[in-house]
Each structure stands twice: as C-alpha cells, then as structure tokens.
Image (cartoon, rainbow, N blue to C red):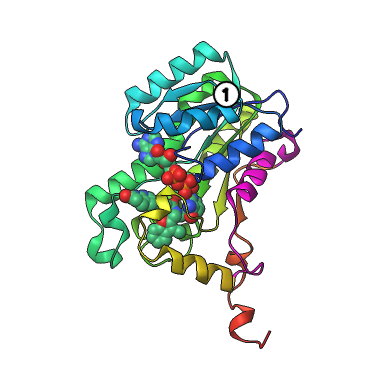
Amino acid sequence: MLLKNKKILITGLANKYSIASGIAASMYREGAKLAFTYQNERLLKNLKPLAKEYGSDILIECDVASDESIEKAFKELSKKWNAFDGFVHSIGFAPSDQLEGNFVDVTTREGFKIAHDISSYSFTALAKASKPMLNDSSALLTLTYLGAVQTIPNYNVMGLAKASLEANTRFLAASMGSDNVRVNAISAGPIKTLAASGVKNFRKMLTQHSSRAPLGRTVTTEEVGNVAAFLCSDYASGITGEITYVDAGFNTAAMPLTEITDN
Ligand code: NAD
Ligand code: 0WE
C-alpha cells in the first residue's frame, strides 16, 4: 500500500481511456483517498461512475482556463478536505488547427497562447491554489510528452507548451522544496485517449512507436499509473524536479534494432 493515508486530487479524467483513469486506478489500489475535478458539466456523467469505482464521491468542476473556476474549486475542496497530499495534473489542450500541418505555417499567436495557458500555466495555477492546503511530504505530478524535447510531426505548438511544462516542473520543485513538496512529471509514450483520437495518423504513430521502442510495444495507462503512484508516494521522497519516461524505452533508442538487424 504505497499511498495509505494519502489524499490526492486528480484532474483530467474525461473517460476510462484517460491517462488520469489509469493513475486513479493505481492510486486507489495503493490505498489513496481520491477527489476529482472535471472541466465541465458535459464530462461529469462519464466521471461519476468511474469515481465511484475509485471509492470517491468528491467531484468538483474546475476549468483551468478561468482563475475564478480554480478559486471556486479549491474552496469547494476545502469543505471536504482540510488538507491533502498532492494532485495529478493531467490536462493539455491546443486548438485543433494548431496540431495539423507545417509548424511555421499553422502556428498563431492565439493558438500559442491557449496551448501554453491550458497546458503549462495551469500547473502553476493549481500549485498556487493548493499550497495553503498541502501537508508535509506532498507530491505534485504532471504529464508531458517527448515532443517537449524532440520534434514530432504535427505536435507543433504543443511541443513548446510541454517544454514550458517541463521547466515549470523544475521551477515549482525549486520553489516548493522548502515546504517538503515534491514536483515531478511523467513523460508518457503515445496512448490512444480522447485527446489523441482527434489526431491525424495517430495509429501510424502507435505502430512506429512499437517498432522502434526497445520493448517493442506501446505503454498502457496502468503502467503510467503505477509510476505515478510511486512518484507520489514516500518511497520517492528523494525525487523532485524530475521527468520520468514511461515509454517502453522509445526515447533512449536513436536507431531501432529492427531496421538494421535481421531479428
Ligand atoms: P484525455 O483527453 O483523456 O485528457 C485530457 C484532459 O484535459 C481531459 O480530461 C480534459 O477535460 C482536460 N482539459 C482540457 N482543457 C481543460 C480545461 N480548460 N480545464 C480543465 N481540464 C481541461 O487525454 P490524455 O491523453 O489522458 O491526456 C492527459 C495528459 O497526458 C495531457 O497533459 C496530455 O498532454 C498527456 N499525454 C498524453 C499522451 C497520449 O499519447 N495520450 C502522451 C503523453 C502525455
Ligand atoms: O499531448 C497530447 C495530446 C495533445 C492534444 C490533443 C488535442 C486533440 C484535440 C492537445 N490538444 C488537442 N486539441 C484538440 O482539439 N499527446 C501527447 C497525444 C498526442 O497528440 C498529438 C500527438 C500525440 C502523441 C498530436 C500530434 C502529433 C502527435
């Protein structure tokens, strides 16, 4: 029981395919008490039965595009929990026109602003709002992608936003370390979630990933969840400001074995 007596807030659970759902399942299995936020009313009906499976009836609306919504959400959470032990930030968004086509041609000031606001600033905003309620030995976690550090076709301005999110992880870790709050990120391999389903040629990316990754496959939300549970547990008490890859080794292989050798 990695997370016995830990209270953790989970954001970004849209449906059972969400990475946040795999994280919630692992954390619940490891004894955590969970609360959830959802972006809007429309997503509440998906979330309700899943939250119940994960032993939770704390469901709070929080649209990270709005300071007012964030403030309201934490006020509501404080009625349920006096204090808690961390949160999972599993939120990313760019307007769909930004994620298809040549980077320099399709990127706009507005698209750039929205991608960075929703995908990176929101992590700082949630940390700021949580700070007064965080227990000693708390842990914050976010989800990033390889596109932060290497180019990926069509990932475009989301790559810049994830680069910002990874720097955000380090600056939050430096900023909150004196309160014994740890801040980390998981860089997950590609997974077919709602956010990925709108992406052109996503299936080809999954195939490419499997053929190039040392483990010869993609990763599951459960595998991401298990690492998330570890990073938010006291077993990871010496880890902060770190980006941990859960990608079947993809980022470590510059030249895939399968394209060179006969086996
Ligand atoms: P998902 O669609 O299941 O989750 C994305 C979530 O972001 C949704 O729950 C959505 O409601 C939420 N969101 C978007 N805008 C919001 C707003 N304004 N306020 C509040 N919530 C908002 O997809 P996912 O793949 O599980 O994505 C979760 C995280 O994992 C994202 O940060 C994504 O970039 C990251 N990630 C995904 C993959 C992948 O291949 N699926 C790989 C690496 C990292
Ligand atoms: O971070 C992500 C998802 C990012 C995302 C996806 C969408 C689609 C629908 C952000 N905003 C939106 N906005 C929409 O309107 N991933 C890591 C998954 C992903 O998305 C890609 C990828 C991968 C991998 C987009 C292009 C290329 C690769």
Where is 3 relative to 23, above or below? above
Is residue 37 toward the left or the right of residue 189 in the image? left
On the image, the x and y values in percent for residue 19 come to 53, 45
Task: Point out the stretch of residues depicted in magenta.
Answer: 213-238
Locate residue 41: give its quadrant: top left
Residue 202: give x, y in percent of width and height: 42, 63
* Image position, residue 45 (x, y; %): 42, 30
Task: Note whether 78 is above or below 262 in the view shown.
Answer: above
Tell me what residue is drawn at x 32 percent, y 29 percent. 66
Q: Residue 216's x, y, as percent?
A: 63, 69
Q: Which residue is mark 1?
A: 56
Identify the amino acid type marked 1.
Ser
Magenta-colored stretch includes residue 228 = yes
> Seen in the image, is 199 located left or right of residue 129?
left
| 230 or 137: nearer the viewer | 230
Q: SS for tag 1?
A: loop
Which quadrant of the rendered structure holds the N terminus? top right
Whether residue 121 appears in this view of the structure is no
